Image: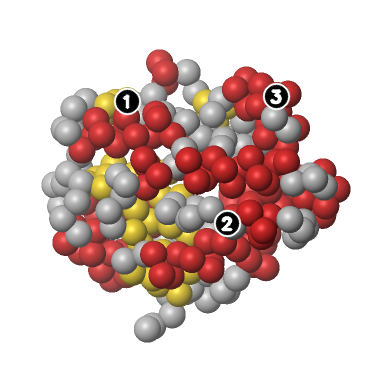
């Protein structure tokens, strides 16, 4: 039987209500949720939005994934910087200025268009298909590496997985991504005064959780082709370095950390 806490079924109502209280008491128009792939950030954000709507409030859930650079822009990076830059996900593959503009618009109470990214097509939807919200009582931004600091240069010297070893042997790609994390993302991080970290048991479970996400995506779009298992196993290697940095650093950065077990059940403190 599925645990009531598992994102597939949604987090338990009492847990969601508790996070809602934390988010509202933070006293900021934007609340951030970080956690590695598969921890249930999107599910929790959607549940928070549903709870707010039931109480007559407007909560706008956003994901860092909404702000991926489009396919053409990443292909250009792949040609000009390194072939691995063409794959979405790591720091350097987001439109940070757009994310800042959207958060500023929502925080100021202006009607704001919300970017949308089609993960199966691997491209941003045209602006004509972006939903527009008139106002928001609260914005929840979720993402797997929110507020993660860059690594020291010395830590980048040795590859840590097959992808880095075989496709980035001289470290060009990982140094490019680390430099982007250092110089491009701080303006966005400054717009996230309060951060919750959903801390999974470790990176080793991320491939399993990410494959579950892809299966869910495929089930929602049976007429389209999502990634295969082999493609997902390669894909998660793009995220491993910064994910491990997140696990090392975010417990000391986040305002609150909630540990999850291998079934994504919150572990009592």
Instruction: State the count of labels.
Output: 3
Left or right: 239 in relation to 6: right
Residue lying at 61% horizontally and 37% vertically, measured from the top left = 88
Residue at the disc numbered 1: 113
Tag in front: 2 or 1: 2
Badge 2 vs badge 3, beta-carbon distance below 8 Å:
no
Is 179 located above or below residue 160 in the figure?
A: above
Q: Is residue 39 visible?
A: no
Marks 1/3: CA–CA distance: 31 Å
Name the mark on residue 80: 3
Residue visible at 43% across and 70% down in the picture:
251
Left or right, 242 with respect to 229, comes to left
Where residue 151 is drawn, which disc sits there?
Answer: 2
Q: How far apart are labels 2 and 3 at the CA level?
A: 23 Å
The single residue placed furthest to the top in the displayed view is 128
219 left or right, relative to 30: right
| Circle 1 residues within 10 Å: few <14, some 14–19, many ≥20 | some
Q: Position of residue 176 (x, y in %)?
A: 63, 40
Q: Which mark is residue 227?
A: none
- Which quadrant is home to the C terminus? bottom left
The residue at the far right in this view is 166
Q: Position of residue 195 (x, y in %)?
A: 34, 59
The quadrant of the rendering that contains the N terminus is bottom right
In primary-sequence order, the first of circles 2 and 1 is 1
Disc 1 secondary structure class: strand
Could you tell me if the residues under marks 1 and 3 are in contact, i.e. CB atoms within 8 Å?
A: no
| Mark in the foreground, 1 or 3 | 3
Q: Quadrant of residue 77?
A: top right
Q: Which secondary structure lies at badge 2?
A: loop
């Amino acid at each position: 039987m599925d645990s009531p806490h598992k994102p597939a079924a949604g987090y338990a109502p009492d847990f969601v209500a508790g996070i809602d209280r934390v988010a509202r008491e933070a006293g900021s128009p934007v609340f951030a949720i970080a956690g590695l792939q598969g921890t249930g950030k999107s599910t929790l954000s959607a549940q928070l939005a549903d709870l707010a709507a039931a109480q007559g409030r407007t909560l706008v859930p956003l994901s860092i994934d909404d702000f991926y650079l489009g396919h053409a822009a990443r292909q250009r990076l792949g040609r000009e910087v390194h072939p691995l830059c063409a794959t979405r996900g790591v720091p350097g593959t987001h439109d940070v200025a757009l994310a800042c503009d959207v958060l500023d618009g929502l925080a100021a109470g202006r009607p704001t268009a919300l970017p949308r990214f089609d993960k199966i097509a691997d491209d941003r939807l045209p602006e004509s298909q972006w939903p527009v919200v008139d106002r928001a009582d609260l914005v929840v931004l979720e993402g797997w590496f929110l507020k993660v600091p860059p690594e020291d240069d010395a830590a980048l010297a040795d590859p840590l997985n097959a992808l880095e070893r075989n496709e980035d042997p001289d470290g060009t790609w990982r140094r490019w991504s680390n430099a982007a994390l250092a110089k491009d993302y701080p303006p966005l991080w400054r717009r996230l005064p309060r951060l919750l970290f959903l801390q999974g048991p470790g990176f080793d479970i991320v491939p399993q959780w990410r494959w579950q996400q892809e299966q869910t995506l495929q089930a929602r779009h049976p007429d389209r082709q999502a990634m295969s298992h082999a493609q997902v196993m390669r894909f998660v290697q793009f995220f491993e370095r910064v994910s491990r940095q997140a696990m090392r650093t975010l417990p000391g950065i986040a305002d609150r950390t909630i540990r999850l077990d291998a079934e994504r059940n919150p572990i009592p403190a």
